[in-house]
Every structure is written in C-alpha cells, then in structure tokens.
Image (tube, rainbow, N blue to C red):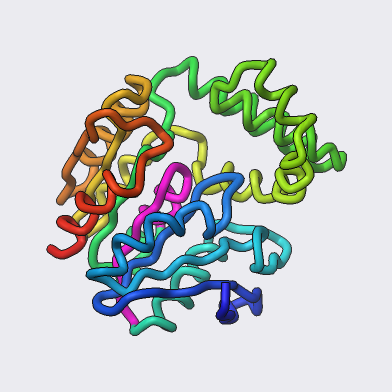
Amino acid sequence: MDKNISSRDGTSLAYESAGRGSPVVLVSGAMSTGATVAPLAAPLAERFRVVVYDRRGRGGSGDTAPYAVEREIEDLAALIEAVGGEAALYGVSSGGALALRAAASGLPVRRVAVYETPYAMSEDDLGERARYTERLTAALAEGRRGDAVELFLRLTGLAEDVIQGARQSPMWAGMESMAPSLAHDDAVMGDGSVPRGLLASIPVPVLSIAGAVSPAWMREAARAIAESVPRGTYRALEGQTHMVEPDVLAPVLAEFLSG
C-alpha cells in the first residue's frame, strides 16, 4: 500500500488505487488484507478507479481501541472522501456485511455488490455462531491467538487435519498476527442472522452474488440479501465457490457497477 489517510478517530489506513473513472472500494473479509482482493483490482481498473485498502487491525493499517463497527464505517467514509466524495462498494464474505452496513448508514455510496456474505440460514447455524463468538472472545482475552484462528477455520468448515497442517505451516505466524481482527468481523456480522431491517433501509442498488457450486446455504444467504433490499439482484456464478476467480467475477461487477 503506497498511501495513508487518517480515519475520524486518528487511525492510519493504508490504501492504494489504480485506474481511472468512477471510484470503487474493495472491502476484504476475515483473516485477509487488501492484498486478498487486489487481483480483482486489475481487471476492474480498466473501467473504474479501484481502491484497495487494509481494514483496521491488519496489514499496513493501525488499530485504535475500543473497536466498534461504526469506526470501520468511518474508515470507509474517509476513503470515499479521499477519492472524490462518492463511491461504489464491493465486499467479499464478512466484508460484504461491512459494505451493506456502510450503505445503510447513509454514506455517499452509489451501488453495492457483495459476494457470499455468510449469514446463517438455520437455527442450528445461529447457535453455532453464538458459541463461536463466546469462544473467540475468551481465546482473544486470554491471548490464545492460535486457538482463535483455529476456531475461525472450524467455523468455515475446514477439516481438522487441514487445520492442524496449517498450524505447522510457515503462514501460521501471519495468521496469528491477524487473530485480533477476527473479533472485528464477528462484530460486523452481528448475531449472524440476515439483518432484514437494516437491509430494507438501503436506498441504492445491491447485487448479491454467490458461487453456483458453493454450499446451498451460501446461495440462500445471498438470495436473502437480494430479497431484503428494495433494489436487489441475485446472481449465481457457474462453476464458482467461495474462492471466486477474479476473471469470472470482474465482468459481472463491471456490468453492475457501470449502472
């Protein structure tokens, strides 16, 4: 990231932009930095000014206690102001929940696209989310960052042998360094249910996307978002999973964001 701005509370945010045209801010999900969504920036930069940033508490950005979701919305407000005063948002996974919250808050957002925002679609899943929140909070309070990362990986459905393999890998130290930001994403997701009241207040067009071969509940959650906003559209991308291919996603986003 080659640029920095200050959010309202003084937190330094690292970002970069590429391309020319109407601004689009890319919002990453849990356990990720701006680098995670950067591959999507290149194809979009042919038509838009694409802004990639490190959310607070990760990468090159700072973090200021106490955390609140409102601070992350203020971060987006600062970025939007820095790139011209209005922007579209694209959020992946829990970053989609943040983008939707930002649009509902009244920020100058012209369109929002989200990919597989993981809202729970059953009572069992809501119960699992509640247990995850409780255990995550305890692990972070006790400084057990590795345990916090394990909890998140289990929540995503990774097999136990894969998780233990990851724990022995060179990338584990970097994952532990970002563990405190898991609490940020947990807060952004609320209780895990589809926030239909909040979504109903979003005045701008929303595109909710899922991979056609992702788990059925992911597609159901994406469809529920589209059905809960006044101007929503649902799309399923053939052959795609949660790890969507940028070259498949970019044309769909470009069409929608062009309006």
Q: Is residue 205 above or below residue 16?
A: above
Left/right placement of residue 67 relative to residue 129 reads right
Residue 2 among those drawn in magenta: no
Tell me which residue sits at (56%, 45%) in the image: 30
Q: Nearer the viewer, residue 156 or 19?
A: 19
Q: Quadrant of the N terminus?
A: bottom right
Q: Nearer the viewer, residue 33 or 148?
A: 33
Left/right placement of residue 183 relative to residue 25 reads right
Q: Nearer the viewer, residue 162 or 185?
A: 162
Left/right placement of residue 26 relative to residue 19 reads right
Left/right placement of residue 136 relative to residue 97 reads right
Q: How many marks?
A: 0
**Residue 117: % across, % down:** 40, 40
Task: Name which quarter of the figure residue 226 lies in.
Answer: top left
Q: Quadrant of the C terminus?
A: bottom left
Residue 98 among those drawn in magenta: yes
**Residue 115: % across, % down:** 35, 43
Which residue extends farthest left? 259
Q: Is residue 198 above or below residue 160?
A: below
Span shown in magenta: 85-101
Tell me which residue sits at (77%, 40%) in the image: 170
Tell me which residue sits at (27%, 28%) in the image: 239
**Residue 12: % across, % down:** 64, 76
Task: Name which quarter of the figure residue 66 lies in.
Answer: bottom right
**Residue 146: % across, % down:** 79, 35
Which residue extends farthest right? 142
Tell me which residue sits at (64%, 33%) in the image: 133
